[in-house]
């Protein structure tokens, strides 16, 4: 390797006259830094290392110039940082999420089923407000209530008689359209309008319905009732209901008062078929004629 750093050009003699009198000695330059790019001096026709790394020639520790030691600077290597791969979701986690979604769907289904029901109208007893084969959404939560006396009876020494209902959302009102189980028929649901509340006096005479001796203004009925109905007081925890088609309706004039516990819910929306009667069931506010 030392041959690569010997200079092939002899030194010129100090006196030109002595040229040719003696052979030109071969001189090596072991301490020359081979780095042409740094603008350092170098000899023509000299052999340089072909390695792209800069090389420094230094004398060996024993000053043996025939075998100089070559130090090569270390190359600086820039290492790319690997990008972390996205974590793989375990199979157990995937199936757990599927199971949770299914259970949540079932819970929502039963929750909605407990609050909302659908009802198909059969018959003409509520014409012209409702017609056969219409589908109605029923709000089952509208008349949620509980008997406070049931809890009071659990207190020692307290004797609570009868029922004392507490309505969470206000209870039935006159003019509400309700779906209920008739007291004298099993496995059937009726749809009628609330006319009298507990304590009201209801009477039908002269083609009008009177509540507490006041005739109701009823623009929604099909025609005036033909048959009279003698004055009756609605008992506690009961309702008096009638169909809008007064002359073709089986209602409280036939089966008597409707116990509140028989109510399924309040008619809220007619959702099928589309037409003039489609949409939210209108509220009726009674006023004096």
Image: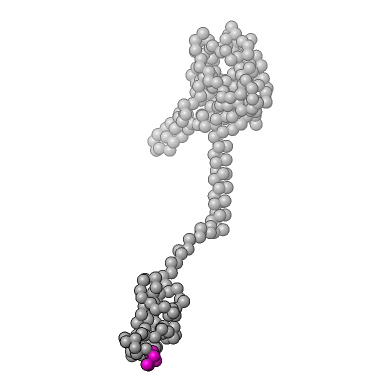
> Foreground residue, 35 or 184?
35
Residue farthest front in this picture = 17
Looking at the rendering, the stretch of residues picked out in magenta corresponds to: 20-25
Image coordinates for residue 265, horizontal then vertical, percent: 56, 29
55, above or below 27, in the image: above
Residue farthest bottom in this picture = 22
The answer to whether residue 141 is left or right of residue 17 is: right
Q: Quadrant of the N terminus?
A: bottom left
Image coordinates for residue 185, horizontal then vertical, percent: 64, 27
Residue farthest top in this picture = 206
Residue 22 located within the stretch drawn in magenta: yes
The answer to whether residue 159 is left or right of residue 174 is: left
Residue farthest left in this picture = 14
Image coordinates for residue 100, horizontal then vertical, percent: 54, 50
Q: Main secondary structure of the magenta part?
A: loop
Q: Is any part of residue 270 visible from this angle?
A: yes
For the image, the number of numbered tags is 0
The quarter holding residue 133 reads top right
Residue for point 54% across, 39% down: 111
Residue 272 located within the stretch drawn in magenta: no
51, above or below 68, in the image: above
The answer to whether residue 53 is left or right of residue 211 is: left
Residue for point 54% across, 45% down: 104
Q: Is any part of residue 258 visible from this angle?
A: no
Residue for point 35% across, 74% down: 40
51, above or below 246, in the image: below
Image coordinates for residue 278, horizontal then vertical, percent: 61, 24
137, above or below 51, in the image: above
Residue for point 63% across, 13% down: 222
């Amino acid at each position: 390797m030392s041959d690569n750093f010997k200079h092939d050009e002899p030194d010129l003699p100090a006196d030109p006259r002595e040229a040719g009198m003696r052979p030109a000695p071969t001189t090596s330059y072991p301490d020359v830094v081979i780095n042409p790019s740094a603008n350092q001096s170098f000899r023509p026709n000299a052999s340089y290392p072909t390695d792209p790394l800069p090389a420094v020639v230094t004398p060996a520790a024993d000053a043996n110039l025939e075998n100089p030691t070559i130090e090569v600077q270390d190359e600086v290597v820039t290492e790319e940082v690997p990008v972390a791969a996205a974590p793989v979701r375990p199979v157990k986690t995937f199936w757990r999420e599927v199971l949770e979604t299914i259970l949540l769907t079932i819970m929502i289904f039963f929750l909605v089923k407990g609050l909302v029901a659908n009802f198909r109208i059969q018959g003409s007893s509520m014409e012209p407000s409702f017609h056969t084969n219409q589908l109605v959404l029923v709000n089952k939560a509208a008349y949620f209530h509980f008997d406070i006396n049931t809890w009071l009876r659990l207190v020692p020494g307290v004797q609570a008689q009868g029922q004392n209902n507490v309505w969470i959302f206000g209870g039935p009102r006159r003019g509400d359209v309700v779906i209920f189980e008739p007291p004298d028929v099993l496995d059937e649901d009726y749809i009628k309008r609330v006319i009298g509340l507990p304590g009201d006096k209801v009477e039908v005479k002269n083609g009008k319905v009177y509540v507490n001796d006041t005739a109701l203004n009823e623009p929604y009925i099909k025609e005036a009732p033909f048959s009279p109905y003698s004055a009756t007081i609605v008992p506690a925890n009961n309702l008096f209901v009638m169909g809008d088609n007064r002359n073709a309706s089986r209602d409280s004039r036939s089966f008597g008062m409707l116990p509140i516990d028989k109510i399924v819910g309040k008619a809220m929306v007619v959702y099928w078929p589309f037409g003039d009667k489609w949409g939210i069931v209108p509220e009726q506010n009674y006023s004096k004629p």
